[in-house]
Amino acid sequence: MIDGLWTAKIQAGANSTSGVLVFTNGRVLGGDSGFMWNGTFKVSGDSLKADIHVKNYDPSVPPRLFGATEYDVSMYGNIKSDTISATGSSPVYQGVSVSLVLTKRAAL
């Protein structure tokens, strides 16, 4: 159900970005124009939990969400058909929450 290509709109306070994610076999991979995302996920019923490592691969692209070039994010969301609404946080940046809306674009 979740395995596939997804687009993401991500907001942290006044900062935002968008990108693509591939969910497959418990792994999540993706990125935007300057950062790559690599992690794992688990689905239980209609709930998603993902732990993602974010790392800048293009130094000309400034950090958008937390102001850092590398960090970890834990994401929790609800799956409704081809949409996931989620929130995320980083243990390093306490008090800063991230909201995500993911839309499935293609199945694997």
Image (cartoon, grey):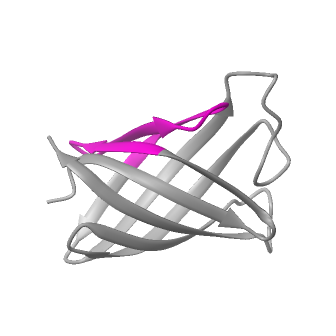
**Which quadrant would residue 39 be assigned to in this image?**
top left
**Which quadrant would residue 60 be assigned to in this image?**
top right
Give x and y (percent) for residue 99. 59, 71
Q: Magenta includes 78?
A: no
Residue at position x 77%, y 48% in the image:
64
Q: How many marks?
A: 0
Give x and y (percent) for residue 51. 49, 53
Residue at position x 20%, y 73% in the image:
81
Residue at position x 24%, y 66% in the image:
82
Residue at position x 72%, y 21% in the image:
58
**Image quarter in which the C terminus is found:** top left
Give x and y (percent) for residue 11. 66, 65
Magenta highlight range: 20-40
Q: With respect to residue 97, does 59 lie above or below?
A: above
Q: Magenta includes 34?
A: yes
Give x and y (percent) for residue 80. 26, 78
